[in-house]
Image (cartoon, rainbow, N blue to C red):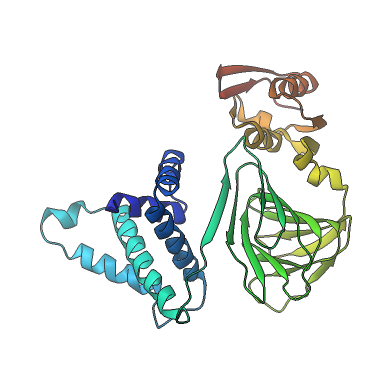
Amino acid sequence: MENKHFWILVTRYLSNESTLEENEELQDLVASNPTYKNKFEQAAEAWSRTKQPRSHGIDPEKIKKRVFEKTTKSKGLERRWLSWKSVKLAAGIVILFVLSMVCWINLPEGTSPIPVLTQVTENGQKTTLTLGDGTVVRLNSGSRLTYPSQFSDSVRRVTLEGEAFFEVMKDSARPFRISTGDLTTTVLGTSFNISTFDPDLTRVTVKSGKVMVADASGKDRESLYLLPGEQAVYHTVTSQLFKREVDLETYMGWKDGIITLDQVSLGEAVETLERWYGVAISFENPAIAHCRISGKYNNDKLVNILENLVFVLDMDYQFIDRRQIMITGQPCP
C-alpha cells in the first residue's frame, strides 16, 4: 500500500533530515515490500539527478519556488499556520515525482533504470560489502556509501560520507571514482582509505597502487598523485590540497580493530569512541575537551579505553546509563 507517509519518509531520508527511528521505519518498509523497494530505488536515482546538469529544462529550485508560491496562496488560517518545513517536504515530494519521470524519459527504449543502492552504518556498526565489479569496501561506523547496482561501461562512480577502506578491482577501461564533497578520488585498481569525519578535512591514504585526487569543482587546479604510504589532505574551507607521508596503521588500523590516537584532543578522541562503540560521551567541564592524548588500542573494550584515558589525564568518568557517559575533572594546564 503506497501512501503519503512513505514518500515523506523517503524525502526526509534523501535530504538528510530523517531521524534514526524514521530510517528504521523506512528500512522495514523497503525490506518487506517489493513495491516500496522499487519506488525507493527509483527515487534515490531521481534525487541524485538534482546534482547533475538539468534535463528537459527542469530546475528543482524553480519547482520548490512554485510549490512555495502555490502553498502560501492558500486562503485563511491554512496560509498563516503553514510551516516552512512542510513546504520543503512538499517540494521534495514534487521534485522526486518530476525527476522520476525525467529518468524514465531519458532511458533508451526497452531498458530499465539501474537501481541506486545505499549502505549505511550507524555508530557502533561496521560492515563489509562487495560491489558489482568485485571491489570490496569496508565501511566504518557512522558512514554512508551510495553506489549503483551495476556500473556503466565507462566509469565506476560511488559517493562516500564518513570513512571507508577500498580494495578496488582492477579495470583499466573503467576508472573507479569516489566523490566526497568537493573532492574526487580516481583509481584503476588499488587499496586506499578515505575519511571525511572531520567536517574541515578530507584525507585520502594509499596502501597500494596509485591514486589521483582532484578538486571536484572543476577549477583549474593541479591533481595530486599518491603512492603507497602517502596521504592527500584537503581543507574544505580554504580548498587547499597537499600530500604527505604518513604511518598507514594510524589511518587504516580501524578496519583491523585498532584505534590510534596521535596527539589528538580529548574531544576528537571522544568523537571516535562515540562512533566506534555507539555511545554518547559528554564533559562536565567543556574545557576538558582541549586536553591532548595519545594511545593505541587493539580491539579493546570501551571501559578499558576510558580507564586508560582518565588515568593518563587524572580525570574520572561515570555511566549515566547504558549508553551515556560523563567525564569529569579539571582542565589541562
Residue, x 34% and y 61% (percent of image)? 93
Pick the front one: 274 or 326: 274
Q: Which quadrant of the figure contains the C terminus?
A: top right
Is residue 80 toward the left or the right of residue 331 in the image? Answer: left
Quarter of the image where one finds residue 98: bottom left
The residue located at (79%, 46%) in the rendering is 251
Residue at horizontal 45%, vertical 45%?
27
Q: What is the quadrant of residue 71 in the picture?
A: bottom left
List x then y, in percent, for residue 137: 70, 52
User: Can you say whether 319 is above or below 202 in the image?
Assistant: above
* Residue 110 appears in the rendering: yes
Q: Position of residue 89 (x, y in %)?
A: 33, 56
User: How many discs mark residues in the rendered view?
Assistant: 0
Front residue of 195 and 222: 195
Residue positioned most to the front: 110
The percent position of residue 295, horizontal first and vertical second, equals: 82, 31
11 to the left or right of 243: left
Residue 100: give x, y in percent of width and height. Answer: 39, 69
Q: Nearer the viewer, residue 297 or 233?
A: 297
Residue 15 visible within the image = no
Relative to 302, residue 222 above or below: below
